[in-house]
Image: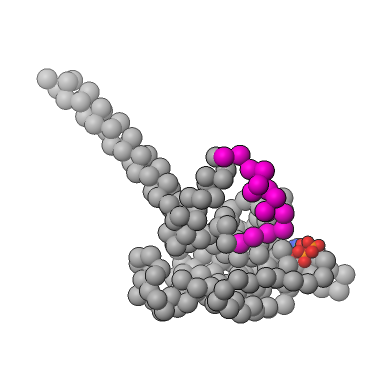
């Protein structure tokens, strides 16, 4: 899977539609202070399912919507789309057969986010798992923000392990294991209940 294009509308300082072509290899974002470099990186984390306002340097999720400027009124929604080239068919199921995958996330003020994959509405979890299974995602070490290298050096071993797990593509398995454990627990409770009823009937 290769990121191909990023489109932003109304996301943070990007009030007008903006499009970024992402070429293969290492991409650096350079520009003067305050021009929106970190906002570009955050938009990628956001479209991949980041759900913490703090990680978006805000206090609420609506803070990603353009808040207005001296000459521009605020917007009521923001949208980010990420186009992925899947010509090598390396995307996990059920997207293996799509040559191009477009993931988008839109937020309407006060109404939360909606996610789409190839135009079809999906859950946040579907988007998060798509990227986690492809060894990338909102916490991927492939997206290096300012100060991240020194944080990594100072990180606790557990946090470093989490980063290695993301890179190794096993992060999605943890989510699935947790869900399977919850289902197992519910099944065990049902079995116990069945035993109780059986004993009552004897
Ligand atoms: P630096 O090099 O100083 O770290 P940067 O290029 O990474 O800066 P960003 O932090 O990405 O810049 O962008 C900061 C700009 O984005 C600020 O001008 C800030 O006002 C603007 N900004 C952030 N959130 C919003 C928002 N919701 N609405 C409008 N503008 C916003």
Q: Residue at x 30, y 31 (%)?
A: 189
191 with respect to 180 (left or right): left
Query: Is residue 107 highlighted in magenta?
Result: no
Spot the residue most to the right: 70
Q: Identify the residue shown where x is 43% and y is 75%.
A: 86
Q: Is residue 67 visible?
A: no
Relative to 79, does residue 112 appear above or below in the rendering? Answer: above
Q: Is residue 148 magenta?
A: yes
Q: Is residue 128 left or right of residue 142?
A: left
Where 195 sits versus 53, above or below? above
Q: Nearer the viewer, residue 1 or 93?
A: 1
Q: Residue furthest left?
A: 202
Residue 22 visible to an observer of this rendering: yes
Residue sitting nearer the eye, 71 or 126: 126
Residue 131 located left or right of residue 146: left
- Residue 179: x %, y % from top left: 39, 45
Q: Residue 107 location, x and y as percent?
A: 61, 63
Q: Is residue 79 above or below residue 55?
A: below
Q: How many marks?
A: 0
Magenta region: 143-157
- The percent position of residue 131, horizontal first and vertical second, equals 48, 61
Give the residue at x 36% y 39%. Answer: 181
Q: Which quadrant of the view contains residue 33?
A: bottom right
Front-most of residues 128 and 105: 128
Image: 193 above or below 14: above
| Image quadrant occupied by the C terminus | top left
Report ligand 1 position as a quadrant.
bottom right
The residue positioned 64% from the left and 79% from the top of the image is: 19
Left or right position of 170 against 39: left
Q: Which quarter of the figure has residue 191?
A: top left
Residue 7 place in picture, x, y as percent: 62, 75
């Amino acid at each position: 899977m290769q990121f191909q294009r990023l489109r932003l509308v109304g996301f943070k300082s990007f009030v007008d539609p903006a499009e970024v072509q992402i070429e293969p290899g290492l991409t650096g974002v350079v520009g003067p202070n305050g021009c929106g470099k970190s906002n570009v990186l955050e938009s990628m984390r956001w479209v991949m399912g980041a759900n913490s306002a703090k990680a978006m340097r805000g206090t609420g999720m609506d803070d990603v919507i353009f808040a207005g400027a001296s000459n521009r009124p605020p917007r009521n929604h923001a949208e980010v789309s990420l186009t992925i080239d899947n010509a090598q068919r390396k995307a996990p199921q059920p997207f293996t057969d799509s040559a191009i995958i477009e993931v988008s996330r839109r937020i309407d003020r006060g109404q939360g986010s909606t996610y789409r994959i190839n135009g079809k509405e999906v859950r946040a979890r579907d988007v998060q798992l798509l990227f986690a299974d492809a060894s990338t995602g909102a916490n991927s070490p492939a997206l290096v923000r300012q100060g991240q290298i020194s944080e990594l050096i100072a990180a606790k071993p557990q946090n470093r392990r989490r980063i290695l797990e993301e890179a190794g593509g096993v992060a999605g398995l943890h989510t699935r294991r947790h869900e399977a454990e919850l289902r197992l627990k519910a099944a065990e409770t049902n079995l116990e209940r069945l035993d109780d009823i059986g004993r009552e009937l004897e």
